[in-house]
């Protein structure tokens, strides 16, 4: 018997890398019992390091009354990890064959009513559930990095996923404190990644053509539209660009400019020169700060934005 979303209190995180570990930290901070499994020999040490690193930010955001890192258990065997799970969050590497095999293994090992969600950043669930005997309970629950800070989760089922599974997963994430988009249909890359990808490709084109540096591109977003996007997305932003006439005036007035060659949405060729230019630009922008230093700065910044918007 599938537990209600309210009664699901034990989460198994399958895969304990950056995303899976971030999920583990998030669920622990919200008072869940978390069991983790990852086949890497040093997985437990890396997982506990990640949880410890995330805990100050989660503490500042506000922990659940019964939140504790002591509620994390690592299991070296997959079967033991999923035994007793009320919900499973799979966060294996983005390799389709691997995910097909892993979801099939999970489907075989877990009681049939338990929902299995994948953190995939792009694969449709229809492509991943093909080897499952009971694919109806498999669903995408796509987070954003770091999962312990970024609220959004995109939920979408595959062709064989049941409607009640999608509804259950969406409600579970909402009760866990996430901002949930329940998609009506599968779209490669989902929604937010499609939008991110368009900006990313244009940025690579500009670097490749010598039109802008890495630093200028980042500054243009951080000190420009990025300051508006936490308040409202691009659609409402452009709605306001139309003044009192709103989006209708904006489209009537600026519509012809959509034909102007402002963007190049064909992927830029990632040549060695382009790759090196992007890497070197990021190194310059980091200016000696380590990855841990940058993570701490990012976390503090996201918290400040969330606090300023009253979302904490």
Image (spheres, rainbow, N blue to C red):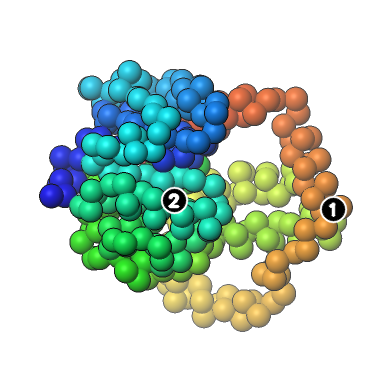
Residue 122 vertical placement versus 87 (above, below) = below
- Quarter of the picture containing the C terminus is top left
Badge 2 local density, few (<14 within 10 Å), some, or many (20+)? some
The residue sitting at 36% across, 60% down in the picture is: 132
Q: Quadrant of residue 261?
A: bottom right
Q: Secondary structure at mark 2?
A: helix
Q: CA distance from mark 2 to mark 1?
A: 34 Å
Residue carrying label 1: 272
Q: Quadrant of residue 181?
A: bottom left
The residue sitting at 22% across, 22% down in the picture is: 65
Q: Nearest the camera: 251 or 8?
A: 8
Mark on residue 165? none
Point out residue 233 in the picture as x, y percentages from the top left corner: 45, 57
Can residue 95 be seen here? The reply is yes
Q: Are marks 2 and 1 in contact (CB under 8 Å)?
A: no
Point out residue 44 in the picture as x, y percentages from the top left corner: 48, 25
Can residue 146 be seen here? The reply is no
Q: Secondary structure at mark 1?
A: helix
Badge 1 local density, few (<14 within 10 Å), some, or many (20+)? few
Residue 187 vertical placement versus 103 (above, below) = below
Give the side of residue 302 with respect to residue 7, left or right: right
Q: Earlier in the sequence, mark 2 or mark 1?
A: 2
Point out residue 298 in the picture as x, y percentages from the top left corner: 55, 32
Point out residue 292 in the picture as x, y percentages from the top left corner: 61, 25
The residue sitting at 39% across, 29% down in the picture is: 75
Residue 71 vertical placement versus 126 (above, below) = above
The residue sitting at 33% across, 18% down in the picture is: 70
Q: Nearest the camera: 287 or 229?
A: 287
Residue carrying label 2: 102
């Amino acid at each position: 018997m599938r537990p209600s979303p309210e009664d699901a209190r034990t989460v198994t995180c399958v895969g304990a890398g950056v995303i899976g570990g971030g999920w583990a930290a998030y669920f622990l901070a919200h008072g869940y019992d978390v069991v983790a499994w990852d086949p890497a020999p040093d997985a437990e040490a890396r997982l506990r390091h990640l949880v410890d690193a995330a805990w100050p930010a989660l503490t500042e955001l506000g922990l659940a009354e019964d939140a504790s890192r002591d509620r994390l258990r690592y299991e070296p065997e997959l079967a033991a990890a999923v035994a007793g799970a009320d919900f499973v969050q799979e966060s294996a590497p983005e390799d389709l064959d691997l995910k097909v095999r892993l979801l099939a293994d999970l489907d075989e090992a877990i009681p049939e009513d338990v929902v299995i969600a994948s953190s995939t950043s792009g694969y449709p669930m229809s492509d991943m559930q093909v080897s499952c005997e009971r694919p109806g309970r498999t669903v995408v629950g796509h987070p954003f990095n770091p999962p312990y800070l970024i609220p959004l989760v995109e939920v979408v089922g595959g062709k064989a996923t049941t409607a009640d599974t999608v509804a259950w997963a969406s409600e579970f994430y909402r009760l866990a404190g996430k901002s949930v988009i329940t998609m009506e249909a599968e779209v490669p890359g989902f929604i937010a990644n499609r939008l991110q990808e368009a900006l990313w490709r244009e940025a690579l084109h500009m670097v490749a053509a010598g039109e802008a540096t890495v630093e200028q591109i980042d500054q243009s977003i951080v000190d420009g539209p990025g300051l508006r996007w936490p308040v409202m997305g691009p659609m409402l932003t452009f709605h306001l660009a139309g003044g009192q006439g709103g989006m209708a005036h904006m489209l009537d007035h600026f519509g012809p400019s959509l034909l102007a060659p402002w963007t190049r949405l064909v992927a830029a060729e990632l040549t060695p020169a382009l790759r090196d230019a992007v890497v070197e630009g990021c190194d310059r922008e980091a200016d000696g700060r380590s990855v841990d230093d940058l993570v701490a700065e990012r976390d503090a910044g996201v918290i400040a934005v969330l606090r300023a918007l009253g979302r904490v």
